Amino acid sequence: MRTVQLSSVADFYTGNSLPVGTAFNAQTDGYLLTRVSDMNLPGNERVISRAQQWNSSPGARSATCPPNSLIIPKRGGAIGTNKKRLAGRPCVLDPNLMAISPHAAQLDSNYLYQWFQAFDLSSIANGSSVPQLNKKDLAPLEIPLPPIATQRRIARMLDHVDELRAMRRQAAVQLDDLAQSIFIEMFGEPMKNERGWKTVSVADAGVVQLGRQRAPKYQTGKHTRPYIRVANVFEDRIDLSDVLSMDFDGTDYPKYRLKIGDILLNEGQSTELVGRPAMWRNELEGSCFQNTLLRFQANSTQTHPTFALGVFLRYFRTGEFAKISSKTSSVAHLGAARFAGMPFPLPPLELQESFSRRIESVRELRQANRSHGAGLDDLFASLQSRAFRGELWPEETNPIA
């Protein structure tokens, strides 16, 4: 497998001071004045085709990269995001960006993009408190270099699978939106209670409990159990990729053991994540929960767990949990008492059960979509690995266009 140093097949552009610009308004000429934040604009997920600012000229001290250059962050925490974008048109880079412009006859820009997708920029950043990337860090990188026709074939193949993955992600967003739409259609916004449902407190609708503290005396022993913490509770989803264990004795285990239908909410998190809820569906038998989480157990005579989750998801998504949380410099705490005192609408139980049946159908679709998405992720990773190890290269004497 042939490899070459990146500097032999590409040029490097380092960002500099941007000229004063005007608001970008779909101008087709001139230069995009590109900042790190522009990498996040809608439509710029792969190719930067717009920016917040524009200018008809690049400016005296600017760093202008040509179209098809690979743009990456080069300073600070942005390096850790590992964002990579292609320049769709001439871009002037600010001091926090740099670009790699491939020699077109030797290195295909889409191939370069896909190779960098598997590369961790943090692994070559220098500096301790403020990470930095420079040409000297990138120039010696060894990139596999098959014939240009093979590069294009590999890029097309990976692009195709990547497009399928993007379609799956979009489908997941649409299914999430569908679940929210069903809730609002049936019940309205719970905090506003436009439908005039009977309203009680969260504590009256079920039982609120804070998880058990991780005390040193419970670290290891014969009663070790898995426990769920903030790192496992995502929005309407439990993630078991990193589960810890500790001892729960005969008294603590029944008290903190999770049961099907329990709703877990992040008690302490950043302001935008505090109160993030998910339902426990016995994903890991015998699990308990830690004091970074609150548990809500619905009163089955008047509250359906799926409806309660719908209420809490609306409170989370509309920022109601963040509003009532206590805040320190870095963490917001929802607090069991504040959560328990929040208003909770109580439509008829039959209507809640009807909602649950509809949401269960959506959940099954989401699970199928997630499973297919995971399969595509595995396929993409396998193809990516094989492609850049040379396993998908044709014989040099028989190139594939």
Image: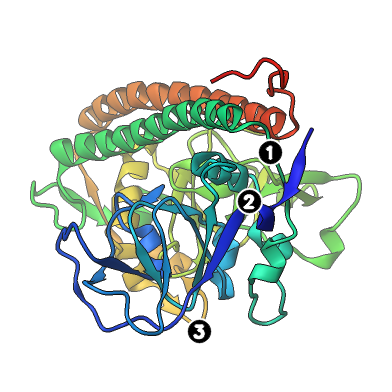
| Distance from Cα at disc 3 to Cα at disc 1 | 49 Å
21 over 64 or under it: above or below: below
Q: Secondary structure at mark 2?
A: loop
Q: Nearer the viewer, residue 280 or 59?
A: 59
Q: Secondary structure at mark 3?
A: loop
Please state which amino acid type lies under the numbered disc 3: Ser
Residue under label 2: 9
Q: Earlier in the sequence, mark 2 or mark 1?
A: 2
Q: Position of residue 164 (x, y in %)?
A: 43, 27
| Distance from Cα at disc 2 to Cα at disc 1 | 10 Å
* Label at residue 329: 3
Q: Position of residue 307 (x, y in %)?
A: 31, 38
Q: Nearer the viewer, residue 92 or 275?
A: 92
Q: Nearer the viewer, residue 178 or 167?
A: 167
Please state which amino acid type lies under the numbered disc 1: Leu
Q: Nearer the viewer, residue 239 or 399?
A: 399
**For the view shown, which residue lies furthest in the top direction?**
398
* Label at residue 145: 1
